[in-house]
Image: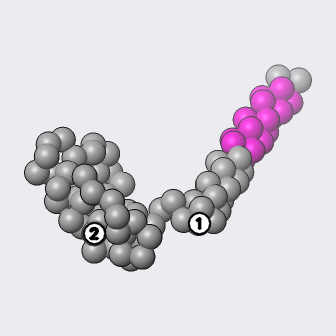
Amino acid sequence: MSELIKDQSKRSAVAIWLLVCCALVYGMVVLGGVTRLTGSGLSITDWQPIMGVLPPLNDVEWQGSFELYQLSPEFQKINSHMSI
């Protein structure tokens, strides 16, 4: 009887893990679709997903980031009126 309970417990743990993974994949697809449809991700000029967590911390870094953004098509076509 205890083996049956252990098997059911393992199966339910795997089922929960699979459901969580499916929910995360679904969330990523929805977030990617919203980003794509709204054009939100177009302004990323230098994407560093692990090391780029911090925003520019001083005026020099902000100016460098803005200069990179000025080279992007989004700035040139849509936001050319922007400044820092």
Q: SS at mark 1?
A: helix
Magenta range: 4-21
Marks 1/2: CA distance?
21 Å
Mark linked to residue 70: 2
The amino acid pointed to by label 1 is Arg
Q: Quadrant of residue 20?
A: top right
Q: State which quarter of the image contains the N terminus.
A: top right
Q: Mark 1: few, some, or many residues within 10 Å (few <14, many ≥20)?
A: few
Nearer to us in this view, 5 or 58? 58
Q: Is 43 drawn above or below residue 15 in the view shown?
A: below
Residue lying at 86% horizontally and 30% vertically, measured from the top left: 4
In the displayed orientation, state which residue is furthest to the front: 81
Residue lying at 36% horizontally and 54% vertically, measured from the top left: 49
User: Any magenta on residue 40?
Assistant: no
Q: Is residue 47 left or right of residue 6?
A: left
Residue assigned mark 1: 36
Q: SS at mark 2?
A: helix
Which secondary structure is most common in the magenta stretch?
helix
Q: Mark 2: few, some, or many residues within 10 Å (few <14, many ≥20)?
A: some
